Structures are given as structure tokens and as C-alpha cells.
Image (cartoon, coloured by chain):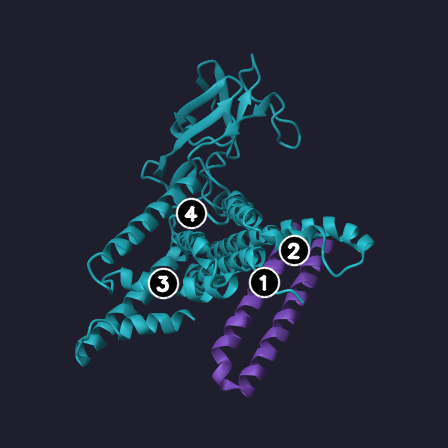
Amino acid sequence: MIMPIFAEILTKGPLLKGAQMKSRNQFLKSLFFSLALAFSSASLWANDPVTSKEPSHEDSADQSVSTEEQISEYIAHHIKDAHDFHLFSYNDASGHRKHIGFPLPVIVYTSQGFRFFMSSEFHHDDSGHQVVERDGVSLVKYHEKIYELNAGEHAVSFDEAHHPTNAHEVLDLSITKSVFGFLLVSLLMLIAFRSLANQYKKRAVPTGFGRVLEPLVLYVRDEIARPNIGEKHYKRFTGFLLTVFFFIWTSNLLGLTPLGFNITGQLAVTFSLALFTYLITQFSGNKEYWKHIFWMPGVPAPMKVILAPIELLGTLTKPFSLMIRLFANISAGHIVVMSLISIAIIMKSSMGAVGATALSFALSFFLTLIELLVAFLQAYIFTMLSALFIGMAVQEHDHH
Amino acid sequence: MTIPNLVGAGLIVIGAGIGLGQIGGRAMEGIARQPEATGKIQTAMIIIAALLEGLAFGALFLGK
């Protein structure tokens, strides 16, 4: 699907002569491979002597990872959202822990109203020790969840299951790493598509990056929207389908970079996307659609009453499966890639540092290539199934 | 990872494997019979594979 499109772009570019075109194609191929290599080279840093030193203190947020529990904690930390943008940490010459990254704003709605502050006030503490006081409200952060201490308390105490006993949760509306990520994705999409749209004022065929986007946009419209929704109504929904397709694809690709994003691997993000699909199908359902749910024609009356709640539940299960499919595919992919990278650390003693790193690099490189395919595929599947559900809602039946 | 967890995960993988194998096999047969329909068959195969993977992953996640 995608290869013919790219092949067409690469070969039917501006009319270059033979040798120029060949060298440009070679350049593009080498660019692609070097980018793929760069994306998957995270495993080469795993055995850096600094990061594999034994930890000197019990700070769970920035330990050097060397044992299996630390590795699984590290992976879980990557999958979860975070209140600061933490690229990596290292021990400098004097043994201090240095963090490269920047804090993000924390916006919480506590029992006494909104509070804003930067997450640097927590000083990289994730175990509930650092208390932030803001206008009479004391807040702590435990495992990336923000709790408000009950009135009069000064330190949080935990029960056996590590739940805080004298603090309660607040409504957390912060700009977390994933929020920052999808704001970045929206900015990229705005820039790319605005410039593509502006090009059509001056010329019929776009130039530059628009050449890559235009066939993809047309593909979504002609192969996903039109066949599934039908000629009469597809224009209303093409905007939504295009947005969802490019948002999911770009977010998946960002998740493959070493920057540590995990946007579509968050249940909240995929839930919102599936919610949009659900709301759009329900609000654009015509009379035929609702009749088929509540009063299915061609079925005896008692069965109709039984079928109605089942059909109603059926409208919910389809967006639910959309949500789970995207979330599970992307986060499982991230977990597997990170586990393969951590093979370099785990097998260091049995295979030697060089052998373990080489094995981990080979495995994670191939898996990252597969993840590139999965990034596109999941975007395509989500868009296609959304188009299918919308089509089922708006289609006009010819009566039997 | 307890024994029931492992057995469940194994069953899920068996189910996914059988399903994908069936899809792939029938797709191959279809392509062999009509090479000019390769594009459509490939597209349909990938769609169904993604649906099945979604089911398998969902089950894996629900069972941890």
C-alpha cells in the first residue's frame, strides 16, 4: 500500500534526468536507513559504564538501572505519563546525579481551587517525600500521581499496599509529557497541512513536503472515506478521518524516537479518540440506524425487546475495541523494544558487554522496523474502522 | 509470573498464531489463484491481522 505511493513520489518527481534522479534516490534511501538506524540505536547506550553503576541511594525516579527489578521499574516508568520531560540522567565526575530535561507545568484542582506551579518544585521526587505548599494546600507526588495532604498533616504516611492514608487525590489537569507530546504533534500537523493547503492557491501540484502528504491525504479520502461512507456523505467526515489518521501515525512515530514519548500508549488518549468516533457515529445516525438498534425489522416482537439492549451494548463495544487495540499494540511494542534493549544489561555477565550489546542492538533494530510498520498500520486500522462505523450509521438502506 | 498466568498467555499466543496462520494461508491461496488481485488480498489480510492482533493484545493486557 504505502510502498507504491512512496515509489511513485520518488520516481515521478520533477522531471530529472537519469543520473540526477539516481543519485537523489540513493540519497533518500541512505537517509531513510540512517534515520531508522538512529531511532533504534538506544540499545548502544545501555551498557555505558556510567549508567550501569550500582545505585547509591533509594531514589526511585533516577536510579541507574542494573538489576531486573530496576529495569522493569524503568520500563513501567517510561510507559506511564510523567510531570516533567526527563530525557536521561547520568552521574557526573563528582558522583552527583545530573538530569537532562525540563519541568512541565502542574495544574491541579484541589479542595481549595486551582493551583499552578512547575514540577521542578518536586525536585525529582516521586516517593511522596517532597511537600509543595501552595496557598494553604500541601501536595506530594507519589508514582506520578499528585495527592493533597489532609488538613493539618505535614507528611504522607503509607499503608502496606503503598497507598497514602492521610492524603486524597486531586483533579490533575497538568501539562504532562504526553500532553506536551500531543501538543507538539498538533503543532507539526498544523504547520505541515497549513503550508500544503496554502500551496493550492498558487499551483495545482504541491512542492516540497507537500508531495509526501498529498497522496496520503488522497488515499485516506479515496480508499478509506469514500468506499465506507458512500458518495453522498463522505465529505462531512473526511476532516475527522484525516485528523485521526495523521495524529495517530505521528504520535506513534514520535513514540519510536529516543525522546521517550508515549502518547498513543496512554489509555486516556486512545479513550478520547474512540470517544470522538463514538460520538460522531451516534450523532450522525439516521432513522434507519436507530431503528435497527431499537426495533430491528424482520424479527418477531419479543425478540426485538431482547435485542434492543444487546444492540445498544454493541454500539459501545466497537469503540471500546478501537481504544484497546491501539493502546495495547503501541504500549506492548514499547515494552518489547525496551525489554530487548535491556537484554544488553542483563546478559552482560553471561555474554560479555560487547556480545550482549550486539545481540540487543540486532533484535531491537529489527523490532523497531516492525514497529514502524505497526505505527502506520494502527493509524490505518483505526481510521478505517471509524469510517466503517460512520458509514454504517449514515447509510441509506434500499428496502428489501 | 505465576503458572496460571503463563498458561493463559500461552493459550492466547496459540489462538493468535492459529488465526493468523489461517489468514495467511488462505491469502496465499487466493494470491496463487489470481495474482492480479494481490493488492486487494494483501490489504484485506493486513486489516484482519490487525483486528486479530488487537484481540490478542487486549487479552494479554487484561490478564497482565
Q: How far apart are the alpha carbons under marks 3 and 2?
A: 31 Å
Q: Position of residue A181 (x, y in %)?
A: 40, 44
Residue shown at the point (54%, 51%) measured from the top left: A327
Label 3 residue SS:
helix
Name the N-terminal-most of marks 2 and 1.
1
Instruction: Write down which chain is painted cyan.
Output: A
Does mark 2 fall on the same chain as mark 3? no
**Quarter holding the N terminus of chain A?**
bottom left
Q: How far apart are the alpha carbons under marks 4 and 1?
A: 25 Å
Label 1 residue SS:
helix
**Quarter holding the C terminus of chain A?**
bottom right
- Chain assignment, label 4: A
Q: Which residue has dot 1 on it?
A: B51
Q: Residue furthest front?
A: A399
Q: Position of residue A271 (x, y in %)?
A: 54, 45
- Chain assignment, label 2: B
Q: Which residue has dot 2 on it?
A: B59
Does mark 4 fall on the same chain as mark 3? yes
- Of circles 3 and 2, which is in front? 2
- Chain assignment, label 1: B
- Front-most of A285 and A156? A285
Residue shown at the point (52%, 28%) measured from the top left: A171
Q: Which residue has dot 3 on it?
A: A36
- Please, what is the three-letter code of the amino acid marked with disc 3? Ala
Q: Position of residue A303 (x, y in %)?
A: 80, 55
- Please, what is the three-letter code of the amino acid marked with disc 2? Ala
